[in-house]
Amino acid sequence: MIKMQSRRDDPSIPDWSRDRLDSPFPPEIEKPYFDNLLEAWVLSRHADILAACRNSSLVPVGHISKRASELSGDSDRLKMRAETQDALSPERLRKWREQLTPEVQAMVVSLPIEEPVDLMDSYARPLCLSLAAMVTGISRVEAEGLQQSASRVSKAAAEPYDPALRISAKAANEELRACFHAGPEALRDSGFVALSQTMPCIFGNAWFALMQQPQQWSLLHQHPDLMEQAIEELLRYAGLTRILRREATSDLSLNGALIRKGERVILRIIAANRDPERFSHPNQVDVKRRDAGHLSLGAGSHACVAASLIRMAAIAITGPLVQRFASVTSARAVDWGGGSVFRAPKSLWVCLIESDGERRIGDSG
């Protein structure tokens, strides 16, 4: 089926308005079709995107111009993945969590009770910056000095179709590369950007989702043992990545779609994570959910190599927040940032509420 997508401004920019966390409507999930304006196949069903992630003939490409032939080959990607996986060993993850925990506990105790506070600037971003410094091997002072450059790179990644953002990011990338020399390539400048800028966005989306369905926050507060399971559910429901791009390196048939060599494919990740054929009651947060298989961290050979680090940080930072506060209410309208690739709260102003008789984390007795 050939179809043209309706978009607001530039018709060559993807804009599925329902693939947003704050949309009042669920994503539209359809059979694979070719979009003439985007010049790409569009996949939105869970089964289709999972098959695409597992198909070796579909390789990652940039959102702007670069063809698969211009990017690193499979051997380079596999080498980079192996180096990164070695660097993210269970022992190192435990070490980083132990280093991060005292700061998390001190910061969660310092959050005001029943007074407006921005969880992004007062909690998520400082903690993620500290983790970014630990993982990339720089000092906290150095990390603070690199924040603005990292922010420019992140903004361009969120909306790669904006030429001004691309120009700004190119200069920022050059600045960042000069500051990182050791460790796996994926955990140098790009790792710093991901941890200091992208990871807070992941948390902002997750906390916004819990705020929208407060009974789930309350359930986690009462049953902290559900946290690992809850993080998977929040990644499914409120995952950050809206779309990914692939290019076919050979002709292939994918669940009935005949994709030719050189054709582009767009994977609508958020839509796939809300597919009722895969998940029961997909448009509800259920921290007790058992049907796993979300695609927010990829799948197959293209699964996110830093998935274990993301999960560790999500548990280490979200757990104490929900453990201390019994409920949370919105203090201001959410100010959203990002673009066609990912979108998240720039600020998340809330009022945090403790239940009667609770002790703060770190209190004795």
Image (tube, rainbow, N blue to C red):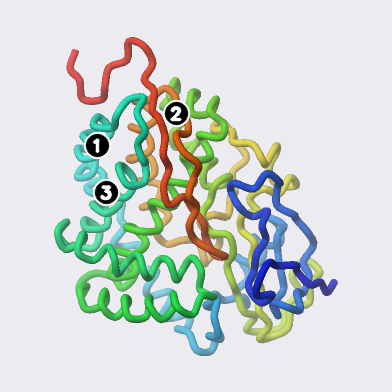
How far apart marks 3 and 1 lie (CA) works out to 9 Å
- Indicate whether 33 appears above or below 89: below
Q: Which residue appears farthest toward the right when viewing the image? A: 1
Label at residue 328: 2
Residue tagged 3: 126
Q: Which residue appears farthest toward the top when viewing the image? A: 357
Residue visible at 36% across and 41% down in the picture: 118
Q: In which quarter of the image is residue 320?
A: top left
List x then y, in percent, for residue 355.
Answer: 38, 16
- Mark before the other along the chain sequence, 3 or 1: 1
Instruction: Give the side of residue 5 with respect to residue 142, left or right.
Output: right
Residue tagged 1: 107
List x then y, in percent, for residue 92.
Answer: 25, 52
- Mark before the other along the chain sequence, 2 or 1: 1
Do callouts 3 and 1 mark residues in contact (Cβ within 8 Å)?
yes
Numbered disc 1: secondary structure: helix
Q: How crowded is mark 2: few (under 14 residues within 10 Å), some or many (20 or more)?
A: many
Of residues 96 and 5, which is closer to you in this image? 5
List x then y, in percent, for residue 315.
Answer: 38, 40
List x then y, in percent, for residue 224.
Answer: 41, 26
